[in-house]
Amino acid sequence: MIETRDRDKDDRPVGHRAELGLLHFEQLANNLPESFWLIDIATKQVVFVNEAYERLWGGRMEDLRRDRFSWLSCVHPDDRPRLRRVIAENRFGGVNETLRALHPDGSVRWLQLRSFAMADDHGRIHSVGGIALDITQVVAQRDELSASIAINRSILDALPAHIALLDQDGCILAVNAGWRQFAEENDYPDDTAGVGLNYLSLCASSGVATAESSAHIEAGLRAVLDGRQSEYSTVYPCHGNTTERWFRLLATPLHNPGRGAVVMHINVTESVKAERQLAQAAHYDALTGLPNRLLVKDRIEQALAAANRQHTKVAVLVIDLDRFKLVNDTFGHGVGDALLVAAADRIATALRESDTVGRMGADEFAIVIPDLESSEDAAMAAQRIMDALARPIHAEGQELYAQASVGIALFPEDGSEAQTLIRNADTAMYRAKEVGRNNLQFYTASLNARAQGQLQMVIDLRRALERDEFCLHYQPKVSCVSGEIVGFEALLRWQHPTLGLVPPDRFIPLLEDTGGIIPVGAWVLRQACDQAVAWHRLGVGTPSVAVNLSVRQLQQSDLVALIRDELARSGLDPAALELEITESMLMHNVEDSIATLDALKQLGVRISVDDFGTGYSSLSYLKRFPLDSVKVDRSFVQDIVADPGDVSITRAVITLAHNLKLRVVAEGVETEAQLALLASNGCDEIQGYYFSRPIPVAETEAMLLAGRCLPANLLHAHGTHLPAAEALPSLAVPAAPMSTPTTGGLQGLLSRTVLDVTQEVLNFFPWPMLGVDENGLVIAINPQAGNWLGNAALLGEAARDCLPEPLLGILALRDSRPRRVIIAHHAHHVFCRPLGTAEQPRGWLLIALPEERS
Ligand SMILES: Nc1nc2c(ncn2[C@@H]2O[C@H](COP(=O)(O)O[C@H]3[C@@H](O)[C@H](n4cnc5c(=O)[nH]c(N)nc54)O[C@@H]3COP(=O)(O)O)[C@@H](O)[C@H]2O)c(=O)[nH]1
């Protein structure tokens, strides 16, 4: 090439020029850092080698010139066999190998050896060239790099964290050993450990973290990937099947912005648990596990906040075990501790779930009772606690009897702050200690007498049964048809040794609260059954006996068996036993009530709903229960004469009850007028002071033997209910409940029950009926009227705009005589009745009786 380039310009002789070229070539070659040489194919001799050979290979140039394979002796013995093989396979060039040259001084150089063929113009190969490049430094650098990569890798793998490298979209590029292991342990479906998948979607779908935390993590990570946040960190729960775990997730962007992020999950379960333990220790007592003073204070504050909102009371009780020190001193601290734990348990079980029991220190406990109805309830709770503690406690082999002194402070009376209430309850507790221990004291002294009286009554009630202080009085139930006594309601009386006859309203709630109603209720049942049998033996009829059941009795698992046994024992005909259950009791737990009543009904007894109208049930709802009769509450009866609204409600109840095949008993009938009105409206039986107050047994027998009856002139005809048209004069349907439930003349009785009943009556009423108020607006319409007029949506319309002409004519006449009208080809007799009183009508009611076809 050198020759060719110079040929045109250089005028020196060719031989000289060739020599010069060779000289230049040699100088150039010897200045190159690479070593290279040429082997002539024909002579198999090394025809050229540059000086770098000796530097790179550590061999001598003349050795190479003499033996073209002498370089092999410079090759590290480990690499030599490979080199030999490669050269044999590539005799005319094509070698490209890395090798080590072992210098005589023991040093090693890394060389990159390449060989190539050299051909003439005809493509005939005449020489093979070789070049060796010194790559010692590159190899050293590469080794260094690999070493540091390996070190980094093992550091990442050794970290107690699951680490993943994410790209900009959140796709997992690489993970560490911890991550892989976690994936394996958590049954990750394949062996990729998520590499190649999107971390953000993995978060949402893995189900390892909660949905809430997944969403939070996804948002945080997105912010890091988008460069909006330089770091994201959160602790999230990640519970296994049997273990509780928490992880801290850390995400940081890769250094090059917009290039992805590193996420790291660190198991922080231990520290979370430690934190929780700290919180537990800060708020709970270590021995009993109860809230400590701090948490009790917090609970009081919460209760006060709620009480302020709802205008209710809160009680704070401080309880101190009497002579606890003596237990410690006598039996040692182990027994003392066991006693405290047992006492804590006893206190807790004597209270509702919504109450808080805390340990204030040593042998002092505090109770928070939110949503308190009366101070007596706090006293009852304190008494329950004292009773619970008084039962023997077995602690570490010792039988102990704990007594307690209780102090009670009430919100709002005794303070409006937690600290004040605790302090005042504490003061009251010390007063309880002073007055002899094992008692309770209110902070407000005036409440003590009341509480004391009530508690004394509870104590007295416990002994009343065994001391034979109870008796039954009986109130007759009288038929409105025959006028005769058809039964008696058994009513419990307590003859207290000092207080005299205590009315049931004062002691039955206490019996219910303390569970005493169960044995007392059983006693009532037994007495009543025996008494009914005794009446039957008089031979003056077979009056029934009605017994009131309480909520607790209805929930009593052996109630049915108890009644069955009493019937069998006494020999009373089951049909002569009536069980009275209040409406609110039935609604307490409907499904259970139905099951119990069904079982009772199977015995053949009768079931009656007491106080009907005071609860929230409607008669149609009561259809679900196996009932025989309803007792209309005396609050309805009492105003029946004065308020036409009450008549209509009572009347409505009677009509509906009869439709449901239920008998109707009106209770609290005190006057002749009430009786007359009830009887004329179809009431079946009455009970009340008008006929008789509840009387002792002896008087009942005298009454039966005397054959006392209701006056015949007040009875209703032959037990049949008045035909509708005849009954109309006494029917005054209230206007308001049919349209605007919050107004109208049913003050005090505008309960949902009444409205339901009224609506039901309207719906049940078999004939068209509609009401128009004094302003001419349609205020009531039943479905039958809607059908009749071909339009049910008349409510609120002006009568003149929507009613047919014949009806408007009748309304204008306001005449109570029936008028014949034909509407939609059907003849009806339409009555117009005033709503309210005839003197001051609130509107008018149109009732259409279909004309009988002969
Ligand atoms: N679980 C049990 N409850 C019982 C038992 N015995 C009674 N009671 C319930 O106690 C409540 C009060 O009863 P009492 O003071 O006996 O009052 C009854 C009647 O005296 C009273 N009454 C009857 N007629 C009139 C009247 O004309 N006017 C008027 N003002 N009061 C009247 O009504 C009470 C009977 O009511 P009721 O039971 O709803 O029929 C009371 O709720 C009893 O149920 C028992 O053994 N167990």
Image (cartoon, rainbow, N blue to C red):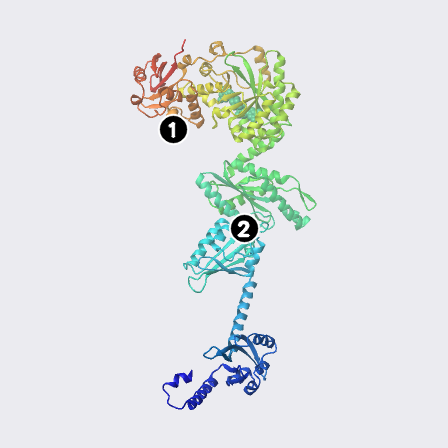
Residue 58 lies in what quarter of the image? Answer: bottom right
What is the number of the mark on residue 656? none
At horizontal 51% and vertical 53% (from top left) the residue drawn is: 236
The reply to whether residue 326 is visible in this rendering is no
Residue 451: horizontal and vertical position, in percent?
Answer: 54, 35
Residue sitting nearer the eye, 324 or 64: 64
- The residue indicated by pointer 1 is 742
Categorize mark 2 by other alpha carbons within 10 Å: few (<14), some (14-19), many (20+): some
Badge 2 marks a residue whose secondary structure is helix
> Which three-letter amino acid code belongs to the residue tagged 2?
His
Q: Quadrant of the N terminus?
A: bottom left
| Residue density around tag 1, few if under 14, some if 14–19, many if 20 or more, within 10 Å | few
| Percent x, y of residue 339 | 64, 46
User: Element at badge 1?
Assistant: loop
The residue at the far front in this view is 122
x and y percent of residue 779 in the render?
35, 24
Residue denoted by label 2: 283
Q: Is mark 1 within 8 Å of ligand 1?
A: no
Residue kind at label 1, given as amino acid type: Thr
User: CB of mark 2 within 8 Å of CB of mark 1?
Assistant: no
Query: 139 or 827, which is in the foreground?
Result: 139
